[in-house]
Amino acid sequence: MDHDLILLGHGSGGRLSHQLLDELIIPSLSGISVAGQNDAAVIAHDSGRLAFTTDSYVVDPIFFPGGNIGDLAVNGTVNDLAMMGATPRYISVGLIIEEGFSKKELAVILSAMREAADLAGVQIVTGDTKVVPKGKADRIFINTSGIGLFDHDLRINGCAARPGDKIIINGTIGDHGICVLATREGLDLQTVIESDTAALNGLVTELLKEGEALHVLRDPTRGGVATTLKEIAVQSGVTIKLQEADLPLKDAVKGVCAILGLDPLHVANEGKLLAIVAPEAAERVLERMRNHPCGVDAAIIGEVTQVSAGAVQMETTIGGLRAIDMLSGEQLPRIC
Amino acid sequence: MDHDLILLGHGSGGRLSHQLLDELIIPSLSGISVAGQNDAAVIAHDSGRLAFTTDSYVVDPIFFPGGNIGDLAVNGTVNDLAMMGATPRYISVGLIIEEGFSKKELAVILSAMREAADLAGVQIVTGDTKVVPKGKADRIFINTSGIGLFDHDLRINGCAARPGDKIIINGTIGDHGICVLATREGLDLQTVIESDTAALNGLVTELLKEGEALHVLRDPTRGGVATTLKEIAVQSGVTIKLQEADLPLKDAVKGVCAILGLDPLHVANEGKLLAIVAPEAAERVLERMRNHPCGVDAAIIGEVTQVSAGAVQMETTIGGLRAIDMLSGEQLPRIC
């Protein structure tokens, strides 16, 4: 019976999301292969290449330390374009608002969108507003779609990871997910954990200077670092090996995860990217990240091996080897 | 107090929608002027022009005679691109699904999207799926965004209507709105009224053969023909005069409107376009429409005058002159 219904986990970004995509959505809509599934579509047409992406934001609560649903929606779409190596340029905004929502809160959200767009150097060029009766939506949902252009010929792609490549992240993991969870549940923490929501296109511009050495870029949002690396391992047909001791993690995030039994590798990020780069470029990429405001806590966290195709493993701090898989079920609904 | 809250009418596509746009959304997000407000943004970049648009669909019920939320969402975005004279090419799909929604119904909706995309000659290239807990959304909402390309230099635009131009519509008005209303309310009609949802890009390709004589194209969706013509009158700084006797209207739609006190000029369409063309081209445009499956009931319904700028008037069947305005308030919520 449950097999016939959509579950919360189908929106987790993890294993159930992938099942729904692979079994129903992609075969129905487009038939695109797993190898071609990236943060944005790259479209080749007569006059060049375009990146095109879409994301809906249903985060609860809509305001949280470090941001709100508005800047989150702009940054998320900017990042999906940047992860393809595109320069994000144009954004659309689709609002679905519940009747009775406060105009004042809407104004705050819209301002945050404009500020985020200005910071990222993108233009909001088109939009749509729908209002549904009270009780038929939860306050406000925002869809942003985006177009990016290319000023280079590099092919940054989830299927381009090669044995020997290094895995680099631009900072601490799990901040966004734990921030939203703590705010929603009213957890009384000694330290306020802020969302890491940020536009990463400026950082990507720095990384693109590495040229061919830059193989994969992806932002580990819903489903966290584990799910994203598993996706890449499958797409590239490689094994990825992480070093637990090298994962950047704030003490407060670590603490909340420990208490609630959450794995920070499965917790969402909104201002992080994973760069998979040729080994000889790794130290330079790390340096470029650390010199950028979005990468001060950057770290090399693992490498690509080829022990068995499509797997992610982690050498733990106590010396064991743990298999890492996609998030299964739903850990934190409505995280973005 | 009510001034601080979002009302259903803010999503009507009519006067309240325009107020919200002009007072809050556009100043916050982009600052684009009224004259530049069209069905899609047209973006000029190094390698050419692009059209870009977005729409969220929240129609209730999600299945209705003639279509469902899926083909409606594809056709609507295809049409917004076509109205700028662009060739619709790429579509994104953002799903927001309520927990517990039926996978079988989802499959039917997705198939309808794919079929509509194939018919319109567009590719669904990217997407996103979010799931919210039961009660936090109503079944399914769909956002589609789209990119269109140009293979000509014509500037089809809401501000291009000129005195003397003829107003032509490709068929009967109000079918979609009355269909959705009748289905939602379970009206027991002798005739089933079907939605007119259809992709109009094929018809637009025909009309573009008129070249410079084609001044404005717009699809009168939410807010109906009245709201759309009022928008154009304001954007172009002209007066538009309609002939009530010439409006194509199905008897069944006319009957429902009469009984419920609805003005068909304010009822939504999803497969109609208004073409505003130079007078010498009018008969040829009418002929082109009538020779196309989407235009068999096409009619010339009025003309552009310049009595007073930004107004729409209608010569009624009893000989009076009636001022036509945008839809005020909300007539039929969740019509698309």
Image (cartoon, coloured by chain):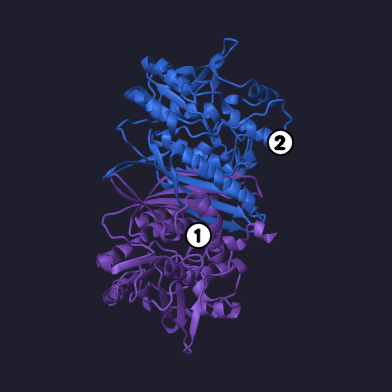
Chain colours: A purple, B blue
Residue plotted at (64% across, 29% down): B193
Residue B225, given in percent of the width and then of the height, sits at 53, 27
Is residue A69 or residue B153 the one in the foreground? B153
Q: Quadrant of residue B67?
A: top right
Total of numbered circles in the picture? 2
Look at label 1 and name its amino acid.
Asn
Residue plotted at (51% across, 79% down): A254
Is residue B129 or residue B335 the one in the foreground? B129
Q: What's the distance in space between the residues labelled 2 and 1, CA to CA? A: 38 Å
Estimate how packed mark 1 is, as few (under 14), some (14 to 19) or many (20 or more) residues with alpha carbons within 10 Å.
many
Q: Outermost residue toward the top?
A: B319
For the C terminus of chain B, the image quarter is top right
| Pointer 2 residue | B185
Q: Outermost residue toward the front?
A: A308
Chain of residue at mark 2: B
Look at label 2 and name its amino acid.
Glu
Residue plotted at (42% across, 79% down): A242
Estimate how packed mark 2 is, as few (under 14), some (14 to 19) or many (20 or more) residues with alpha carbons within 10 Å.
few
Q: Is residue B48 above or below residue A222?
A: above
Indicate left or right for A207 with A189 as reference. left
Q: Outermost residue toward the bottom?
A: A318
Chain of residue at mark 1: A
Residue A68: which disc?
A: 1
Q: Is residue B277 above or below residue A158?
A: above
Is residue A236 in sight in this rendering? yes
Residue A255: which disc?
A: none
Residue plotted at (52% across, 62% down): A18
Residue B252, given in percent of the width and then of the height, sits at 66, 23
Is residue B80 or residue B198 the one in the foreground? B198
Q: Is residue B284 above or below residue B234?
A: above
Of helix, strand and loop, which one carries label 1?
strand
